[in-house]
Image (cartoon, grey):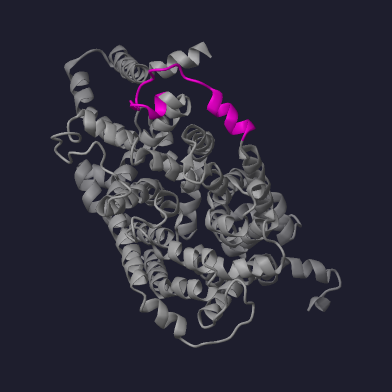
Amino acid sequence: MALLIWILQNFWSLLVLAFASLVGLRIAYRFHKYGATRAELSHILRRSPFYLVVLIFCFFAAAPFMIMFLHSFKVDGDLYRRPQPFVYRQDPTLEHLESLFTNTAYLDFIRNSVVVGVAVVIITLILSLPAAYALARLTGRWGERAGILMFLVYLVPPTLLFIPMFRIVVMLGLKDSPLALIVVYPSFTVPFSMWLLQGFFKAVPPELEEAALVDGYNRVEAFLRVVLPLSLPGIISTIVFTFTLTLHEFIYALVFITNTSRRTLSVGVPTELILGDVYFWQPLLAAALIIAIPVGFAYNLFLDSLVQGFTMGAVKG
Amino acid sequence: MASASPVINPRRYLMDDRRFVGLIFLAPALLYILLLVGLPFLLAIAFGFSDVTVGNTELNFIGFDNFVAVWENDIFRQVFGNTVMFTLVSQVFILIFANILAIIFTQEFTGKWFARFIFILPWATPVSLAAIGWLWMLDTKYSPIDYLLLQTGFLGPNGLLSNSRNLFWLANPALSQISVIFVQVWRMTPLATVILMAGLSSIPTDILDQAEVDGSRFMRTLLQIKLPLILPIMVIALLFSMITMFGDMTVVYVLTRGGPVDYTRIIGLYSFQIGIEGGNLAQGAAMALFAFPLLLALALLMLRTASRAEVR
């Protein structure tokens, strides 16, 4: 706790210090490796504009998140009275973070999002794994047409569909039920993951399946025992991105679910943590940041895999 | 069919037939999607030509009345204009930034992992939550941006931009539109970058090696080899983010709810406000349908570009 207070109070100097020491270490390392020659110096100078550009982009990307972090721990007086947004004049506090978890439905939102996300991932995999394999290997011209049709369907925006879907959901008595979201979300996760998975399946050498067929497997067994295990990394990254798609979705969740404790994160946080005109800023900002960091981490971890799937899906294998 | 040889089990024969297995594999996903998108889509068209409301479940068809009413609505015209303007302007910036970033992130450099983590955050964060961050950044009274401008003398008494202590980002017509465009660019750039990265990394290395052997330097390789080669994928990235933005209302819902007056209202938001909040399902559907021909044209253009890229 004392450490947290100290970090928060010296946030900017620590940030600059950490950055400077990293740069210093890196330069020292290069000098150590290649010698402190003129050529090395000019290499560093030549590279520095590049790093400057990276730094500027990073700053713009990160600015709201840094502010979220800093402001989540401010006491009300420090936040609102003669504000100095970038420094702490009063000791940081954890009270808002605590109240986010105890006084609001935040934990409900997280739980609902996870339930919906996991269910949608399962449905999506059941539907899209075989379909993507069919598109990648089994079907000829008509399969290609079906693939294009799926792609077109992906482009029909939720803004066009939410009104009739709202009607259907109400008619089926699914309003305020997570089931409504679980049934509807695959309409965009299935095309998306089919597109990705198709790329991963194309990357598996067809010779392996043919060998399996010669060994007496049929097509379905070859798919289950050879192709699926080999494309496991791709499947995992598809799971990650499908899950986050459901986490991001806003319009359907806003329209179908109006009961506070049934809402999901993306809608619950911006609508339920605000009472009328009163914004509880610290919990709001903390609530956003707590979700942003792990998802960003997962994205970065699986980005290369996503790029690969996308490339293979776009380029005919 | 399997009677030719008694050794072959007919079920096994079927399981080995590519077309049959392909059909069985593809059918469930295809049916699910067609049911879940096709049905509501047809219903949306039916709604557009009817007088259905939240309370009234009967479908009475009233022809083009909704569309006429929507088009004669001055607010809707502005909303339509806003939507097109926001989408087009932000694409310009997204494309510029995404190109720069894609080139940066397909190179190796120290700290790349961390830089990539930072730059991907805007896209990874659920839109509505990221918009909350910006809602605070652009707050009427406590905006940290205003504070910086105040400290540097751009705001406050005798300030260069304004004499007031605040710019009122989301209350001023022009600034609110700029803010919405900025936030859209901020959050959509990473997606376009990733698509472009996929394009850049799919360029065959032998082409690049050959260019290097021939003495092509960085800028020349970039301008004369890489950019022309990824042009089709750039078009895909562009149209993809255009369609995503066209069909999204989250940012304006959280930031402004369409205000001040109607300056940041877009089609998605307006049809939500009329159709769901106002209960007039028919007119809400008609509004959303107005945008559809445009989206369809974009999608077809996109597919043509994509298929041309494959042929080449």
Which residue occupies 40% across, 58% down? Answer: B245
Q: Is residue B116 left or right of residue A226?
A: left
Mark count = 0
Residue B80 point in image, percent of width and height: 35, 68
- The answer to which image quadrant residue B23 occupies is bottom right
Which residue occupies 51% across, 44% down? Answer: A305
| Front position in the image: A293 or A266 | A266
Residue A201 point in image, percent of width and height: 58, 54
- Above or below residue B71? Residue B98 is above
Segment tinted magenta in the rendering: A78-103
Residue B159 visible in this rendered orientation of the protein: yes
| Front position in the image: B251 or B222 | B251
Residue B191 point in image, percent of width and height: 41, 49
Q: Is residue B1 left or right of residue A298?
A: right
| Front position in the image: B199 or B2 | B199
Residue situated furthest right in the rendering: B6
Q: Is residue B7 left or right of residue A18?
A: right
Q: Is residue B226 left or right of residue A212?
A: left
Residue A158 point in image, percent of width and height: 52, 63
| Residue A25 magenta-highlighted | no
- Above or below residue A8? Residue B149 is below
- The answer to which image quadrant residue A65 occupies is top left
Which residue occupies 48% across, 63% down? Answer: B273
Residue B18 visible in this rendered orientation of the protein: no
| Residue A85 magenta-highlighted | yes
- Above or below residue A69? Residue B287 is below
